[in-house]
Image (cartoon, grey):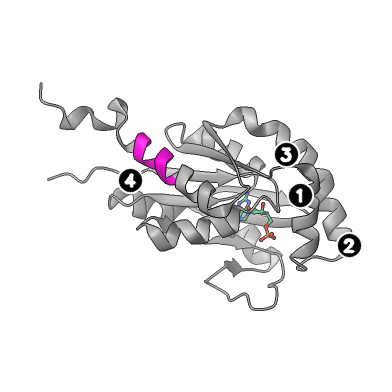
Amino acid sequence: MTVQEGILIVLSGPSGAGKGTICKELLKETDIKYSISATTRKPRKGEKHGREYFFLSKEEFQKKIQEDEFLEWACVYDNYYGTPKSFVEEVLSKGYDCILEIDPQGALKVKKKKPDAVYIFICPPSFNELANRITNRGTEDIQEIKKRLSCAKEEMLSVENYNYVVVNDVVENAVKKIKAIILAEKCRVARNRNLCIK
Ligand code: 5GP
């Protein structure tokens, strides 16, 4: 029996919108597989190689680009970030759904290769709230915060490239909406032609 390929879910939006928190909650409640990205950014306190990210040197990252190991990669806030291709392909081919938590440039690159994926834009309730969240999480210095906020204005305009938008006011509600989106996507005729009685 052939396995029905899983759905690729791309969660994107500006830094501070809450993509990471939403993703964590979603993974607790479902058997969706999370794609761990590679990055040249330095690990933050408490982050572990192979859990939050694969932390690589610039040289290691560039080698992987040359060897075509990424589904997409982008330079985000002066660091490289990329999605390992083999993991995503393997998970999908085994019939599991796979989620990417990536920036809007990366989402656009994936869309060109995988138009059938589900593109969800996570939006903060307001720009002020976004600024509060980035500042209060205390993981970036003031220069980094400014950089992320100035990028956010432009990133918000990219919402037109997505299938769905979820405003992250209350995490629990945002997770509920995303689960509903995935459920509806699973019922699309285009994904179920082989199951219908002819
Ligand atoms: P952070 O440094 O806060 O962990 O992530 C910075 C930004 O990079 C976030 O918007 C995050 O979603 C994005 N990001 C994380 N992994 C990837 C990836 O593999 N590809 C791309 N394009 N962006 C990523």
Discs 1/2, front: 1
In the image, what residue type sits under mark 1?
A: Glu
In the image, what residue type sits under mark 4?
A: Gly
The residue that disc 3 covers is 155
**Between disc 4 and disc 1, whose residue precedes?**
4
**Between disc 2 and disc 4, whose residue precedes?**
4
Residue 155 falls in image quadrant: top right
Is residue 184 in the magenta section?
A: yes
Q: CA distance from mark 1 to mark 2?
A: 17 Å
Viewer-closest of 137 and 173? 173
The residue that disc 1 covers is 129
Q: CA distance from mark 3 to mark 2?
A: 20 Å
Mark 2 residue crowding within 10 angstroms, few (<14) / some (14–19) / many (20+) = few
Residue 43 falls in image quadrant: bottom right
Q: CA distance from mark 3 to mark 4?
A: 28 Å
* 197 left or right, relative to 90: left
Q: Is residue 185 above or below residue 171?
A: above
> What is the secondary structure assignment of the residue under circle 1?
helix
In the image, what residue type sits under mark 3?
A: Glu
Span shown in magenta: 179-185
> What is the secondary structure assignment of the residue under circle 2?
helix
Discs 3/1, front: 1
> What is the secondary structure assignment of the residue under circle 4?
loop
The residue that disc 4 covers is 6
Does any portion of residue 69 appear in the rendered image? no
Rendered location of residue 53, percent (x, y): 58, 66
The C terminus - image quarter: top left
> What is the secondary structure assignment of the residue under circle 3?
helix
In the image, what residue type sits under mark 2?
A: Ile
Q: Is mark 4 within 8 Å of ligand 1?
A: no
